Structure formats: C-alpha cells, structure tokens
Amino acid sequence: MKNVEDGLFSSLLNRASIQFDEGQLLSEIEGKRVLVTGAGGSIGSALSRRLMSLAPAQLILLDHSENELYQLGVELEADEIGTPLTFVLGNVCDKPLLDEVFIRHRPQIVFHAAAFKHVPLSEHQPLAVIHNNVIGSYLLADCGIRHGVEKLVLLSTDKAVSSTSIMGASKRFAELIWLGLCGARTRSVVVRFVNVFGSRGSVVPRFAEQIARRSPLTVSHPEASRFFMTAHEATGLIIGVLWLSASGTLFVPDLQEAVRILTLAERMIEDAGYAPDKDIPITFCDLRPGEKLSEDLISAHEVSYPTAHPQVRRVESPVPSARVIRNLIAELQKASACRDVVRLLEIVCEAVPEYQPSAVLLAVVESSTEIRNR
C-alpha cells in the first residue's frame, strides 16, 4: 500500500506535501512521557511509529483491541529503538482505568486517537458511537486536566463540519469538549484532519482489493469528492500543532482542492495497467447513510487565520462554557446509561445544532424507542 500511496500522492493531490521540521517535532516530544489512545488503529499506529522516532521518555499505548495492541507491540519492539513501551488494554470510557494510567505513568502529553469512525455503520449504532466518541473524550480530557497533563491533543475529522452523520456530530461534540475544558496547567488542542491514504476501511485499500480481483470498483456518486493526506503528513500535523498552539485552539490543514473519488478510481485502475470501464468497470452505488457529497474543513460559523506554518490554518470556533459542557455530559451519561436514544439525540442536537440526522438514524431511534416501550 505504501507504493500506491506514494504514486497517487504526486499525481492526484496536485499540491506540495505538508512538512514539519523534524527539529520542531523533536523539541515537543523528546524526553516526554506520551500517551496515545486508539494506538492500534490506522492513525494511532502510524502516530505511535512517528513518536518512537522522536525519543520520548516513555510511550504509553492504549487500545481496546487486544489483537491490534499486540500487533503494534510486535512491530514497535522489533525496531529496537530503546524507548520504554507500556501497553494498556482497555477503553477510554473506563474512568477508573484512566485514573490508574495517569497516576501510575504520569503522561505529560496525550494524543487522543480512539474513536469509532465508520460513517454508515455508525448510523445504526448511535448509542455506542456517542458513548465512545463523546463520553470517552470527555472522561479523558477531564482526567488529563485533573492530573495536570501538560498537553492534550484531540484528533478530529472534517466530518465534524456541518455534520450529516452521528459520527461527524460526535466528533464535533468532542471538539467542543476539548476546546471548552482547558485547565490552568493543561494546554488543550484540536487538529481536524482528513481522509488518510491507505488507512484501514478507507477507499484506497478497498479499490486496491477490487482491482486485484478484477471486480467492478464501487463509487458512491460521480461527483463525490474528499480531501486526502498521507499518513506521514497526518502524523506530522498531529504532532506539529503542539509547536503552533495556544490552549483551546483548533487547527486544520490548508488544503485547497478535494479529489473526486471517480478520478481516484480511474487513476488506480490505470496505475495497475488496466483500462477503466473496459478492463475493469466502475459502478455507482449512491451515497450511503450519513455520507455527504463533499466535505469542508471549516464551517460557515468559523473563521480561519494563518499560522507560522504556511499550510496550516488556525480556526476560531464558537464554543460553549465549561459549565454548559459539563451539564450536557451529565445529561448524556444519564441517557446513555438507560439507553434512551431519543434523549441522547436531543442532547447531541442541542450541543451541535447544525447537525442534520439522516433518515436511517431517525428510523433506528424510532425502533429503539419501540423496544424500550415494550
């Protein structure tokens, strides 16, 4: 997949690669105790590998997947770099576990990559998505602030902008938590990035598998488009915002042009030595529940400003007070505990008023209500 990523980057993205000076990244990480949540996932594992090269004093890797955490450990330990590694099998929604991790290992920097991210699947699982992405993000931020962590970094997504999916709305809610709960000693930062080439479950590996089988490539819509970054760009941005940031700040990459998914499909077929629609057909399956035709990095209610990095923008976003956030979370925890999906959705819409629930999600809510009333 690395060769596919490198080849497509130069031919499709039509822009200079986003680069951070390695010395700047090293100055933020070297000698620090660093915690990564969701460490076994596509972004979490890429970030963990990048952090290993920056000489942290300790790398604490938390993930709820035993297999992914094990595989990451095998890979990192094989590098024999010498950084002490600590593996934590657990969930960010487990408050006692988080307290134990922070007391025992005293992380100074936290990168929060743990999240449910698959939009169509999430539309059928609103309780799980909100519990993990919103309540989990709150518990981690609150824990970090209580234990005096120096820096908290939330990995968000362009799907949080003008959300049409529960996943996107959950990430916007998490952004508000991270931006609104800044402690006196804790610098809290959000980085909103985009689709990463080659990440598990994304379009590039799916197209590659379809090409290998000589089966039709399935594209949602002829005009569907997405922003893309390489894993190296994404991890550089995630770490680099520490060098750019003040507390309570949201950052986005300055990406001028999205890539049409149809163009991506055609280019991948051609790069494999075939002719689109002749050797390998392209079919359209329409947008899936919660998906948009295109994504934005900044909403109409936000204003962006340049930073010291020419390819990164600082975004000013309306954020509720810490008191309002904590009240919303308290209500959300009650609704989640009794599986009250109607109330849960009301709270999400109150926190993220621009969110427009899909017909599929509303049907799931109605069905869940019928079950609760039996």
Image (tube, rainbow, N blue to C red):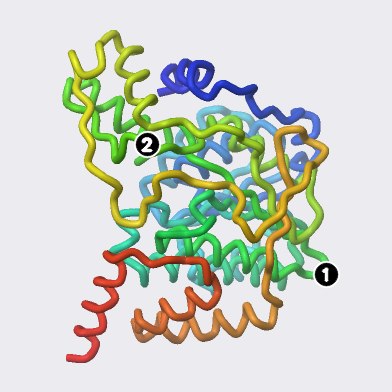
Observer-nearest residue: 80 or 36? 36
Rendered view: 319 above or below 323: above
Can residue 83 be seen by looking at this rendering? no
Read off the residue under disc 2: 223
Choose top left, top right, bottom left or bottom right for residue 57.
top right
- Name the residue located 51 percent from the left edge and 85 percent from the top edge: 331
- Name the residue located 55 percent from the left edge and 27 percent from the top edge: 79
Read off the residue under disc 1: 184
Choose top left, top right, bottom left or bottom right for residue 232.
top right
Label 1 sits on a secondary structure element that is loop
Rendered view: 106 above or below 320: above
Residue 6 in the image, given as x and y percentages of width and height: 50, 18
Judged left or right of residue 200, residue 244 is: right
Name which residue type carries label 2.
Glu
- Name the residue located 68 percent from the left edge and 69 percent from the top edge: 319
Residue ranking furthest to the top: 273
Judged left or right of residue 167, residue 9 is: right
Rendered view: 107 above or below 21: below
Rendered view: 309 above or below 275: below
Residue 30 in the image, given as x and y percentages of width and height: 77, 39
